[in-house]
Image: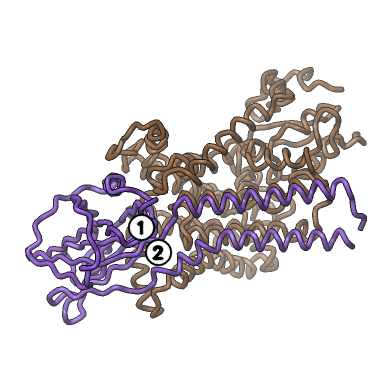
Amino acid sequence: MAQTKNHRWLICGSAISMLFLLLPNMVQAHGGDERTRIMIGEYLLTPVFAKPPKTGDNFVYMQIVNGTGKPVSGAQVEISAKTVENTNPHQEDGANGADMMNSMADMQGMHAMHGMGSSPTTAPIHDMSSMKSMDTAPTQAPFNELPPSSGDYFGVITFSAPGHWKLNTHFTINGQMFNADFPVDVGDRSSSFAITALAAFIGLNALIIWIASFTKRNPVSV
Amino acid sequence: MTDPLSTPSPSWLLGGNLLKNDWIYRFLRSRWYPGIIQWPTLIVFMVIMFQLMLGPSVTHDNFGSALTWVLWWPIIPIIFLFLGRFWCAICPFATINDLVQNFVGNNRPVPKFLKKYGVWIIDALFIFITWSDHVWGIVENPVGSGILLLMLTTGVVASGAFFERRMFCRHLCFLGGLAGNYAQAGMISLHGTPEICAKCNTASCYKGTETAPGCPIFEFPKTMQSSANCVLCGDCIKNCPNGSIQLTMRPPTTELWFVHKPKVEAAFLAAVIMGIVFVQNVTMLEVWGSILSWLERVTGTTSYYVTFSITFAVAIALPVSLLAWASIVATKYNKASFVDNFTRFGYAIIALDLAAHIAHNLFHLLAEGKSIWYTGVEIFGVESHGASPALAGMATIQTLQFGLLGLGFVGSLYIVYRIARSNFQGDVVWATFKPYAVLMGVLGILNVMLFTLPMSMRM
């Protein structure tokens, strides 16, 4: 009987520990559901991250509708990303500017690079004055309209570090260029979380092995 | 002791006993097998873990991610097809289980509920892990992949520490469940020779001897009628005093033509795997963003948990419902119960599952294969940004994908026919065949449609 109880405690303990291992990820995953909408001229842009933005690859799609709410198709859409300095203490131990730009170049690894045109119209919606953008050459991720004529545009953006980023959207409709910035908070999938998870793993497994060695030497009859 | 080599047979490669080949026989009986493959695999696993947990945070640059999701995951179903569950014999989790067991193993019996509901638990775990991969981003995040592997390692350590043999591999490993289904469609089979086993009273293959432990997966070759739980570890070959064990090659899917004791949970898993292949394909398609957008408009929420879960549930429910529909229709003609039809004919989906699974992963293997090299040399400071990771062009990949799907479709159709023929007679065979042929046709067409659309990469 005592052995059965012992098993139950072990199973419950293992399950609870595994939930704790997962918890930080779950909390992060809730963070990106708020929707940003940007009005530029007569166009309303809604950039949507398929999942809350985190370091690594992020699937993003952009809805563009006109003043009457009709989807705008045939636009050329590109998004570039820049980090914003001094807004997140984690950035200091994350990556420096050069690393970030290297990584941003990575983002183009499997997506064709498009040249960046000048942007006669810039319409920042959010007040970015308190943020200082890194003075680095931005790179673009081209977006494809899928399905055609739907007004929905899809692409992949890679963030190399957690913290505050600025996404600059360029889109061209009927030869007219538009430009808008919007901020993104990128969640941390950094090594600190990995080290916490590793520590939890080692602790839990050491505990399991210790209990097993104890119960092996002191068998409890059912 | 009877030496199988003493019985002359030239046909060991053509459906005969592979153990009649001197090299194979000596290798599998050697004390070096499977350790000589197991230990290097464990070392590679540790390198992968190190890279996943402490390497580059971007999947695109992570060698562990490349090895896991571009190399290992795509080739694993191919291994199941050609070598059955051989992977399970050299799996690092199995090695860790054995290692822990040797030091502190309590060797307690497997809990009864696991014996009874193990496959259902595997089904649930498989569904949960796939769901969590999408919701929490396991594949696209090295640390996420690492945590999944750490959790599995913890399960294996607990299993090895407290329970006998490889309890985790038999009753809890989600990949083991998948492997069990695919191995039945596989080209290799291990079994005892009935005439020799009938006279045997030692059961050394199950119990073990001083030479080797008993079957780690709790199988008894004397009565074993399925390859679902044979990992080709070679222990029974080493232990059998009568040289009864045979290792034979067979055409793919042969075992599925005559499943002696079909299990509803295995049939359900076969249908679920098809749904999971749909999910994997749909979420990697570039139209996925538009589908999400539409779902958000319909449901009125932007929560990915909600939108993805709906997609996931629909994708899983689709093949299960179609199998259920075909079973209901077949019931009208063959008068068998719905559950019997669902269970028997569910196995026929396995061939299409395997083909679709390999076809899906072929894209990652061939379109991203070079990323393994690039991320590997990046560890040593060699940069390769911008280089194409493709091993083959899209036209070649799609040709192979459609070829595989075609083979899987034909394989599934033929299994349906064979199952119908072995259970029914006369006109009932074709009357039963028809609804399942429609099922395979629908599943095949859905797969073809998904494979024609552009797909996103993992790396």
Foreground residue among B285 and B437: B285
Q: Residues within 10 Å of mark 1 (few under 14, many from 20)?
A: some
Which residue position is annotated with label 1? A58
Q: Are the residues tagged 1 and 2 within 8 Å (C-beta)?
A: yes
Q: Amino acid at mark 2?
A: Lys
For this view, does A74 lie left or right of residue A59?
left
The first of marks 1 and 2 along the sequence is 2
Which residue position is annotated with label 2? A51
Asked if one can make out residue A161 in the rendered structure from this viewpoint, the answer is: yes
Q: Amino acid at mark 1?
A: Asn
Q: Is residue B314 above or below residue B141?
A: below
User: Whole-percent x and y of residue B176?
Assistant: 64, 48
Report the chain shown in purple: A
Which residue is depicted at the point 29% across and 73% down? A36
Report the chain shown in brown: B
User: Whole-percent x and y of residue B310?
Assistant: 47, 71
For this view, does A195 lie left or right of residue B156?
left
Foreground residue among B365 and A28: A28
